[in-house]
Image (cartoon, grey):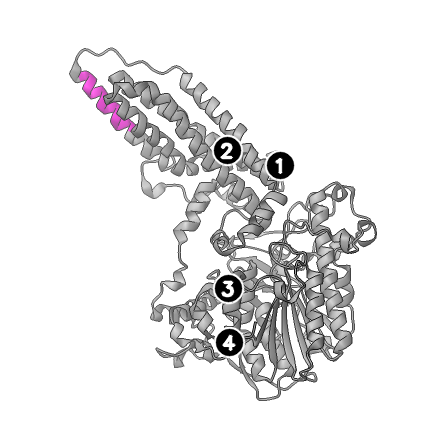
């Protein structure tokens, strides 16, 4: 009995060491795959701290390998002799199952980082309403899904083999003792030591729970390197951290707490009383139209239509040549530093349409927002100016419950890309190919003989992974459309697919805009993207840098065009955000004295600060709220200095988040929706 307990506990400890070794190997693979520096040369101390701290932090989960074996194998084997021969088999099965969990979490992290340039964060939870067929398409056709699935077999076989070899290593023998009392005391000591050892491992080499490893305690030299700091975090720890945060704190506040938080942005906080709608305080008065009211306003919302490809350092890639030409047209005003309302499609579109930040709450899936709207809603306010409002989406309106949510924001008519295009039109899982969708939208718009001015919000889908649209079939030729690409790009088929799809989407958007301009010369166009997306293949010799700047990671594109526009109308501004679009439209076309509601000012007035849930811009700096870092707001082919522990204008960001939380907690303040939109 004593021997079974003592030897079994040692075998449990052997296997416990395997899990953190697996995590360390995964950490190294992650660094080699995505890290800006692939070796520790000159940074041995930093790398040592990264791996050592990661080892102990990861024991928060990995210590349970010991507990599993000890409770389910060692202790029962003491009392059930028939179970003892199966003990090692159960141990091996247990560590192999746990290794499968580690492999799954690691593979998911690698895919997540590829798409979002971040380890697991709250964005993960938004996947529950994503198109599962599209996710599968991306997994298999862009992220080597078959290879990942096939990798389970050799990985788990190797894990089982190593576990078996570890169990064959010699163990300490039970010391010769004189009496049963001594054996009893010995067993008690082993039991107490085993319990203590578990907690010592789980708390990261300490028995004081308060000293348990946490993000705040990551060694300063590691934390100063944002990539290595994230590499320190084991995947299960990262998932646990985002689960711990749960619902945003602003949804749990009392009304009194909310008033204190959103007071910094409220125009008249002293006049706010219980039962008031705080958004009504953001009433603004138009100064008088700057241009003749256009008969058509087109807001082209391109999937992943980001700023980075437009930057001068990437001009030789030619993937947005058509967009560049459009930006140079007379009457086109460009902002190269522009923030989206969110980092994902749904959060970005909801923020823009509602005029309040979505804050990753997926307000489009909240039934209260299907039945009522907020006074800051974009389309509803344009209707007050006499505009009809029309929403166009290249995919199915069932995505993101758009068919329920969008009418509540003030759109009269909705157009589903799958319905307006011919049956069997080629499509991705997200929607009909952009050029087909836009050609059919143009046809319907041209057939509309109603002379009432109209606002069109047009949202495309094609510029999205896995980038497998057969663009060659539609006239794309790499040699003429994307000339002079570096050899490293020409050898990377995945990169070429991304570039070709970008070129295709850019051309489809610009072809549509030019066609509409020929039909309606007085049209006002806004071209922007739903969010930024990774497209530049760093490390392939295009520029010296091996990772994106914050500009490239977060900024979407923005251009506004109308025959009467000139740069002088825009107060020498160089920054802006999606939330500035509505007030800008109002100040451009609304008569003097017209009232509207907007949390943010128009781009026709001086803008020194742009805020989004994830980011801030001022005229010199861009900052990331999640990582608390900042960089100069400049285009550079070289690495930019990064300032750590920066959370500027955080009180404003928190205030705008609080306004959203207040409206979610008080759906009775929403204006009930009347007439539903046509389909």
Dot label at residue 676: 4
* Image disc number at residue 38: 1
The residue wearing badge 3 is 401
Determine crowd level at label 4: few under 14, some 14-19, many 20+ residues with C-alpha closer than 10 A. some
User: Are the residues tagged 3 and 4 within 8 Å (C-beta)?
Assistant: no
Q: Which is nearer the N-term, disc 1 or disc 3?
A: 1
For discs 4 and 1, the disc positioned in front in the rendered view = 4
Q: Who comes first in sequence, dot 2 or dot 4? A: 2
Residues under labels 3 and 4: Cα distance?
14 Å
Residue 38 x, y percent position in the rendering: 62, 36
Q: Secondary structure at mark 1?
A: loop
Residue in the foreground of this view, choosing between 416 and 574: 416
Q: Residue furthest right?
A: 480
Mark 4 or mark 3, which is nearer the start of the sequence?
Answer: 3
419 sits to left or right of 470: left
Disc 2/disc 4 C-alpha distance (Å): 56 Å
- Circle 1 or circle 2, nearest the eye: 2
Residue 93 left/right relative to 559: left
Q: Which residue bears the numbered disc 2? A: 24
Quarter occupied by residue 449: bottom right
Q: Position of residue 363 (x, y in %)?
A: 47, 65
- Give neighbour class at mark 2: few <14, some 14-19, many 20+ (Cα, 10 Å): many
Mark 4–mark 1 Cα distance, whole angstroms, equals 56 Å
Task: For mark 4, give the secondary structure.
Answer: loop
The mark lying in front, picked from 2 and 3, is 3
What is the CA distance from the residue labelled 1 to the residue labelled 3?
A: 44 Å
Q: Earlier in the sequence, mark 2 or mark 3?
A: 2
Mark 2 vs mark 4: in front: 4
The residue segment tinted magenta is 182-194
Q: Give the quadrant of the C terminus.
A: bottom right
Query: Where is residue 78 shown, x and y percent of the image?
Result: 25, 21
Q: Can I make out residue 408 in this image?
A: yes
């Amino acid at each position: 009995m004593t021997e079974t307990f003592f030897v079994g506990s040692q075998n449990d400890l052997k296997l416990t060491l395997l899990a953190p070794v697996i995590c360390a190997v995964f950490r190294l693979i992650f660094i080699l795959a995505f890290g800006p520096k692939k070796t520790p040369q000159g940074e041995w101390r930093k790398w040592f701290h990264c791996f050592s701290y990661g080892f102990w932090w990861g024991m928060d989960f990995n210590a349970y390998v010991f507990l599993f074996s000890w409770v389910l194998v060692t202790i029962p084997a003491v009392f059930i002799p028939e179970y003892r021969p199966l003990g090692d088999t159960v141990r091996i099965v247990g560590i192999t199952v746990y290794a499968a969990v580690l492999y799954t979490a690691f593979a998911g992290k690698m895919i997540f980082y590829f798409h979002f340039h971040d380890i697991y964060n709250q964005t993960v939870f938004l996947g529950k309403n994503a198109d599962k067929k599209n996710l599968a398409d991306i997994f298999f056709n862009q992220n080597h899904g078959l290879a990942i699935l096939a990798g389970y077999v050799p990985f788990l076989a190797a894990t089982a083999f190593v576990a078996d070899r570890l169990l064959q290593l010699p163990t300490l023998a039970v010391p010769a003792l004189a009496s049963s009392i001594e054996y009893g005391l010995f067993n008690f000591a082993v039991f107490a030591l085993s319990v203590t050892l578990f907690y010592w491992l789980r708390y990261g080499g300490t028995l004081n729970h308060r000293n348990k490893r946490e993000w705040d305690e990551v060694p300063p030299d590691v934390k100063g390197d944002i990539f290595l700091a994230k590499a320190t975090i084991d995947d299960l720890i990262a998932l646990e951290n985002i689960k711990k945060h749960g619902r945003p704190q602003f949804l749990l506040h009392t009304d009194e707490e909310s008033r204190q938080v959103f007071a910094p942005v409220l125009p008249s906080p002293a006049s706010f009383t219980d039962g008031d709608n705080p958004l009504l305080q953001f009433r603004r008065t138009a100064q008088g139209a700057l241009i003749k009211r256009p008969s058509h306003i087109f807001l082209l919302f391109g999937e992943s239509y980001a700023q980075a490809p437009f930057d001068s350092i990437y001009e030789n890639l030619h993937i947005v040549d058509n967009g560049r030409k459009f930006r140079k047209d007379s009457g086109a005003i460009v902002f190269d530093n522009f923030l989206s309302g969110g980092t994902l499609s749904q959060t970005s579109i909801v923020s823009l349409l509602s005029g309040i930040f979505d804050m990753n709450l997926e307000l489009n899936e909240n039934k209260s927002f299907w039945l009522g709207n907020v006074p800051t809603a974009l389309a509803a306010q344009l209707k007050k100016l006499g505009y009809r409002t029309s929403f166009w989406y290249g995919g199915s309106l069932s995505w993101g419950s758009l068919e329920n949510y969008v009418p509540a924001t003030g759109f009269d008519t909705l157009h589903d890309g799958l319905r307006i295009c011919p049956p069997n039109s080629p499509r991705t899982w997200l929607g009909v190919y952009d050029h087909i969708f836009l050609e059919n939208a143009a046809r319907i718009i041209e057939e509309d003989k109603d002379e009432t001015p109209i606002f069109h919000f047009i949202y495309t889908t094609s510029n999205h992974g896995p980038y497998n649209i057969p663009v060659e079939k539609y006239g794309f030729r790499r040699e003429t459309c994307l000339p002079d690409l570096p050899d490293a790009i020409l050898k990377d088929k995945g990169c070429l697919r991304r570039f070709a799809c970008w070129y295709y989407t850019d051309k489809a958007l610009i072809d549509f805009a030019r066609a509409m301009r020929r039909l309606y010369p007085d049209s006002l166009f806004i071209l922007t993207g739903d969010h930024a997306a990774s497209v530049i293949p760093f490390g392939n010799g295009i520029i010296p840098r091996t990772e994106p700047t914050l500009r490239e990671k977060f900024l979407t594109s923005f251009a506004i065009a109308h025959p009467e526009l000139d740069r002088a109308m825009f107060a020498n501004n160089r920054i802006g955000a999606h939330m500035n679009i509505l007030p800008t439209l109002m100040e451009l076309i609304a008569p003097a004295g017209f009232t509207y509601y907007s949390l943010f000012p128009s781009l026709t007035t001086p803008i020194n600060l742009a805020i989004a849930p994830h980011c801030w811009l001022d005229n010199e700096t861009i900052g990331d709220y999640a990582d608390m870092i900042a960089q100069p707001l400049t285009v550079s082919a070289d690495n930019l200095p990064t300032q750590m522990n920066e959370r500027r204008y955080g009180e404003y960001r928190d205030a705008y988040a609080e306004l959203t939380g207040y409206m979610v907690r008080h759906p009775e303040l929403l204006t009930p929706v009347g007439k539903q939109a046509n389909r």
